[in-house]
Amino acid sequence: MEFAERVGALAGKVRSQAESIGTEEATKNAFVMPFIATILGYDVFNPLEVVPEFTADVGTKKGEKVDYAIMRDGEVQILIECKPSMGALKIEHASQLFRYFSVTNARIAALTNGVMWEFYTDLDAPNRMDAKPFLVLDLLDIDETLIAELRKLSKDSFDLDSIISAAEELKYIGALKREIASQFREPSDEWIKFFTSRVYEGAFTQRVRQQFTGLVGKAAQQFLTERVNDRLKAALGASSSSTALTESPTSSEIAEADIDRDPELETTLEELEGYQIVKAIACGEVKPQRVTQRDAKSYFAVLLDDNNRKPIARLHFNGKQKYLGLLDEEKVETRHPIEGLDDIYAHAEDIRAAVLRYV
């Protein structure tokens, strides 16, 4: 199994089990040890590679332990501190890592709850662990750009010099991406004022602030949606000027497809990502250009030939529980609950069968 596939497999396990893991020990057994073994590639049962409950006396602090120390050639390379999977990570949880970092040869430290992994080094001062991580991995929302950097930490590819040299850029790019994402989710007053001042010439009053709070958020969401659509078109070799279909729908079908389009609908990134997965599956039977999408108030539809009489699947992502809707030959829909987008792949056979009914 390739490295990225191993990361994806563990992410699937985390996604399905995270809510049932309530203690730190359960987190270690279910998530942390598999991460050390399958992702980092170390033998968790070999004390020459992985030392659990690692102890190194620090000043007046005697007998304190770090959950795991990963060893190479008899030296500590990575320190790992664990917290329960249901708890949020805070820098206060890393107090032992700070102390141990200065008295061992470790240049890498990790704080984790099994779901989130925060990796630290000593960019700001030699032998002193930074207060902010250089790499943050969320197994429930994997940033694929980090996979190559994560691999450098694995036993087979361990490259400390490369890790450290890239850490500063990773640290600030990651922090900037997280800040941008938070602003897109919930714009701050400064963000709203910044953009408002570039399009509105009047005074920035409380009324204007309230008006533009919604407008900035809506514009940001639409911008992201348009960017995702552009990427999808480029990836599938389609463009607005080249949409010739292998089997073109009739003019009446196109007219029917345009009924009930609501310009006020806001398509989410998650819906577009789900559509991309369904489309990838469907493209095993038809050309990509024939698989289209249509958003509605209650669901997001994936269609063949942009024809609502040829539904392939429906994505019900508006509530807390997500469902994949699949229709049978009589157009009777069955909703299948899914925990994450990867669960769509489990229904690949039914998706392909739906496509074949129309060709």
Image (cartoon, grey):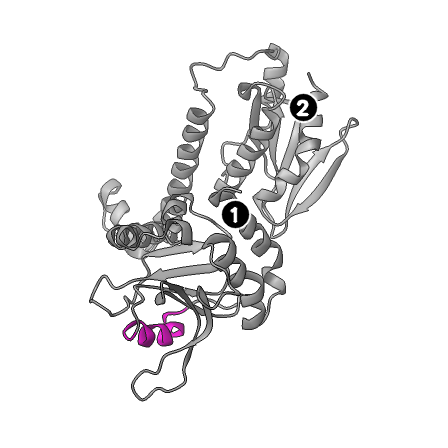
Mark 2 residue crowding within 10 angstroms, few (<14) / some (14–19) / many (20+):
many
Examine the residues drawn in magenta and state their main secondary structure.
helix
Type of the residue with mark 2: Val
Quadrant of the rendering where the C terminus is positioned: top right
The span picked out in magenta is 90-103
Query: Residue at 66% of width from left, 34% of height from top?
Result: 348
**Who is closer to the viewer here, 197 or 81?**
81
**Who is closer to the viewer here, 255 or 25?**
25
Q: Is residue 356 visible?
A: yes
Residues marked 1 and 2 touching at CB (< 8 Å):
no
Q: In this view, does 79 lie above or below 37?
A: below
Query: Residue at 35% of width from left, 55% of height from top?
Result: 135
Q: How many labels does the image show?
A: 2
Query: Residue at 36% of width from left, 50% of height from top?
Result: 152
- Residue most extreme to the bottom: 60
Residue beneath disc 2: 355
Q: Where is residue 5 in the image (x, y as percent from the top left)?
A: 52, 43
Mark 1 residue crowding within 10 angstroms, few (<14) / some (14–19) / many (20+):
some
Is residue 97 covered in magenta? Answer: yes
User: Which circle marks residue 6 in the picture?
Assistant: 1
